[in-house]
Image (spheres, helix red, strand yellow):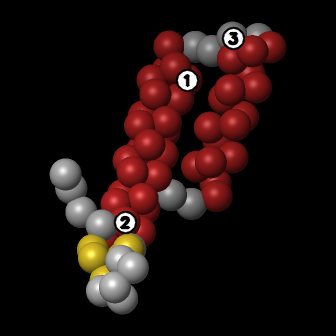
């Protein structure tokens, strides 16, 4: 997600609090928020895929689904 989209999310949030949003702006806000959530989840999943836990005996154990 690029900075322009994040700025647009923040702009819509401020406008929502002060003036209110049109139906088109509400739809745009929902779309942008969902895209942001997917980006965060994807980044977290990628980070966890590359994370290992060191056991006391020195072995590496990959963090995975339980």
Residue bearing the label numbered 1 = 25
**Left or right of 66 in this view: 18:** right
Q: Quadrant of residue 9?
A: top right
Q: Position of residue 38 (x, y in %)?
A: 38, 47
Among the two numbered marks 3 and 2 on one chain, the one whose residue lies closer to the N terminus: 3
Neighbourhood count class around disc 3 (C-alpha, 10 Å): few under 14, some 14–19, many 20 upward: few
Q: Nearer the viewer, mark 2 or mark 1?
A: 2
Q: CA distance from mark 3 to mark 1?
A: 9 Å
Q: Residue at x 24, y 63 (%)?
A: 64
Which residue is tagged 2?
A: 48
Q: Which residue is mark 3?
A: 20
CB-based contact (under 8 Å), mark 3 and mark 2? no
Q: Is residue 6 above or below residue 17?
A: below
State which quadrant residue 16 falls in.
top right
Secondary structure of residue under mark 2: helix
Q: Is residue 3 above or below residue 61?
A: above
Q: Residues within 10 Å of mark 2 (few under 14, many from 20)?
A: some
Residue at the right extreme, as displayed: 18
| Pick the front one: 25 or 65 | 65
Q: Is 29 left, or right, of 4 in this rendering?
A: left
Q: Residue 31 at x, y = what percent?
A: 42, 34
């Amino acid at each position: 997600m690029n900075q322009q989209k994040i700025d647009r999310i923040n702009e819509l949030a401020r406008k929502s609090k002060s003036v209110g949003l049109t139906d088109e702006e509400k739809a745009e806000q929902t779309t942008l928020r969902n895209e942001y959530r997917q980006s965060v989840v994807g980044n977290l999943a990628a980070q966890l895929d590359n994370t290992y836990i060191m056991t006391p005996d020195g072995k590496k154990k990959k963090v995975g689904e339980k």
